Image: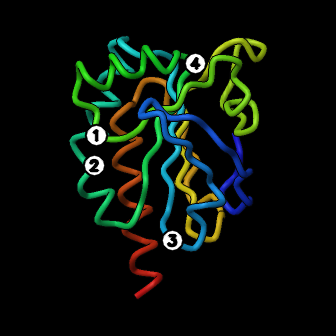
Amino acid sequence: MLRVGQQAPDFEVTLHTSETFRLCDELGKRHVVLYFYPRDFTIGCTKEACAFTDHFNTISRLNAAIIGVSPDSVETHREFARQYSIAFPLAADPALELARQYDAVWMGGRAMQRVTYVIDRGGCIRLAAHHALFINNHWKRTIDVLQELKRESS
């Protein structure tokens, strides 16, 4: 896992909305919540996506974009987002290239871990969370860090 204080690697991904997201385009504008999860439609991953959706407005008000990343296809992401009314874009990483770049792989690089990063407007990692089972810790810690970033900028 990458460390807090490190510069986040730049990346470009295609979202389930057919848009392209580039980290460099967000720098100086808003923070980015980048969370990796193993699979769409699994119990834990669905709970996590729904929890982030439940707190999407708070995260947005704290000047942050959120991107979910899994190895699933764009088509699978579209169905997952539709079925569960996911409020934010999902990115497909079937070859685990982005996950490797962000050290979010395990099982010898064959599977994606549950890892959440908060990247500030300057491109610095401010949160690196890995909790395979404590899914609610991710959104809670994300909001805590975003609130701290808001206090710092005031």
Residue 75, given in percent of the width and then of the height, sits at: 44, 16
In depth, the one of 17 and 121 nearer the eye is: 17
Q: Which residue is mark 3?
A: 29
Binning the other alpha carbons within 10 Å of mark 3 as few (below 14), some (14 to 19) or many (20 upward) gives some
Give the structural element (helix, strand or loop) at label 4: loop
Q: Earlier in the sequence, mark 4 or mark 1?
A: 4
Disc 2 from disc 4: Cα separation: 22 Å
Give the structural element (helix, strand or loop) at label 3: loop
Q: Earlier in the sequence, mark 2 or mark 3?
A: 3
Where does the C terminus fall, quadrant-wise?
bottom left
Instruction: Please report contact status of discs 2 and 3: CB closer than 8 Å, yes or no.
Output: no
**Disc 2 residue type?**
Phe
Quadrant in the rendering for residue 146: bottom left
**Disc 1 residue type?**
Ala
Where does the N terminus fall, quadrant-wise?
top right
In the depicted structure, whether residue 139 falls above or below residue 5: above
Residue in view at x 47 percent, y 15 percent: 39
Q: Earlier in the sequence, mark 3 or mark 1?
A: 3
Residue in view at x 56 percent, y 25 percent: 92
Residue in view at x 23 percent, y 23 percent: 84
Q: Which label was assigned to residue 71?
A: 4
Q: Which label was assigned to residue 56?
A: 2
Binning the other alpha carbons within 10 Å of mark 1 as few (below 14), some (14 to 19) or many (20 upward) gives some
Q: Earlier in the sequence, mark 2 or mark 4?
A: 2
Q: Which label was assigned to residue 87?
A: 1
**Disc 3 residue type?**
Lys
Quadrant in the rendering for residue 138: top left
